[in-house]
Image: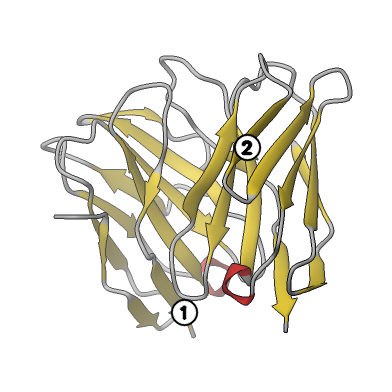
């Protein structure tokens, strides 16, 4: 059962363009939604995260948009750069004593071309 | 150390061999997670420790998989009688707090079972 669905699987964007990656979740108990960036041969690294009490969070060129009623959230990368080329994973978890166990999406391979 | 350290980085095993993968989390981090990442997929949860207590092992795929964290710091993931389907990258992550917050991932141990 895939609890977090991610699209697209791959994405090619021109330098300076906007990259948009979408995720949808099923479990309404999820209350923490991070995005992770992974370069080849490296572990995932936290990029930005949001909680459901806000609809948008922006950090530099990265913005998360969150739609609680639709159970969807998305990552927008503004002014995309070649250095942004990586695999991006959305994730979701339930905060609490059981640990912040993350459920990941399947990933989006982003390539930013010059 | 500065980050989560995993060893070995690469392991080749013949089918039926036992393997042990080590994780050295960030000093002082209470929570420790193991994830399995198949090629081209998102990380999948295996197990979770809070200090030395293994609180969730619901993601371990079979009883051939065993994890421990006896002193609440270093953890070992052991796979007995390895099978070809065990080939994957095994990621370790740690978190300072319980129940919430950023997970810091290591670079992973890539296991190839021949």
Q: Nearer the viewer, mark 1 or mark 2?
A: 2
Q: Position of residue B103 (x, y in %)?
A: 41, 41
Q: Decide: marks 1, 2 in contact (CB < 8 A)?
A: no
Q: Residue at x 50, y 56 (%)?
A: B36
SS state under label 1 = strand
For residue A18, side relative to residue A52 (left or right): right
SS state under label 2 = strand
Q: Residue at x 49, y 57 (%)?
A: A44
For residue A80, side relative to residue B89 (left or right): right
**Residue A94, quarter of the rendered image:** top right
Label at residue A36: none
Chain containing mark 1? B
Residue A42 can be seen in this image: yes
Between A40 and A53, the residue placed more toward the observer is A53
Label at residue A58: 2
The residue sitting at the right extreme is: A70
Label at residue B112: 1
Q: Residue at x 69, y 58 (%)?
A: A107
Q: Position of residue B52 (x, y in %)?
A: 20, 31
Residue A2 can be seen in this image: no
Q: Classify A86 as above or below A54.
A: below
Give the position of the N terminus of chain A as an image quadrant.
top right
Q: Are marks 1 and 2 on the same chain?
A: no
For residue B83, side relative to residue B5 (left or right): right
For residue B68, side relative to residue B14 (left or right): left
Between A89 and B82, the residue placed more toward the observer is A89
Q: Residue at x 66, y 14 (%)?
A: A53
The residue sitting at the left extreme is: B71
**Residue B71, quarter of the rendered image:** top left
Q: Classify B3 as above or below A90.
A: below
């Amino acid at each position: 059962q895939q609890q977090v669905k991610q699209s697209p699987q791959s994405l090619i964007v021109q330098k300076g363009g906007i990259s948009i990656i979408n995720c949808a979740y099923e479990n309404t108990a999820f209350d923490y939604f991070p995005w992770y960036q992974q370069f080849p041969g490296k572990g995932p690294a936290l990029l930005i995260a949001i909680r459901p009490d806000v609809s948008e969070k922006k950090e530099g060129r990265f913005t998360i948009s969150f739609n609680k009623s639709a159970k969807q959230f998305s990552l927008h990368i503004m002014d995309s750069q070649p250095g942004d080329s990586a695999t991006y994973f959305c994730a979701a978890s339930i905060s609490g004593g059981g640990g912040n166990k993350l459920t990941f999406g399947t990933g989006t391979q982003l390539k930013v071309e010059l | 150390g500065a980050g989560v350290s995993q060893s070995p980085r690469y392991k080749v095993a013949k089918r039926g061999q036992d393997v042990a993968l080590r994780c050295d989390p960030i000093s002082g981090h209470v929570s420790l997670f193991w994830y399995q990442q198949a090629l081209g997929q998102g990380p999948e949860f295996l197990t979770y420790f809070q200090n030395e207590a293994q609180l969730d092992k619901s993601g371990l795929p079979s009883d051939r998989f065993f994890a421990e964290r006896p002193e609440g710091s270093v953890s070992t993931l052991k796979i007995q009688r390895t099978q070809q389907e065990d080939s994957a990258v095994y990621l370790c992550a740690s978190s300072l707090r319980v129940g919430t917050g950023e997970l810091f991932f290591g670079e992973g141990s890539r296991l190839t079972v021949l």
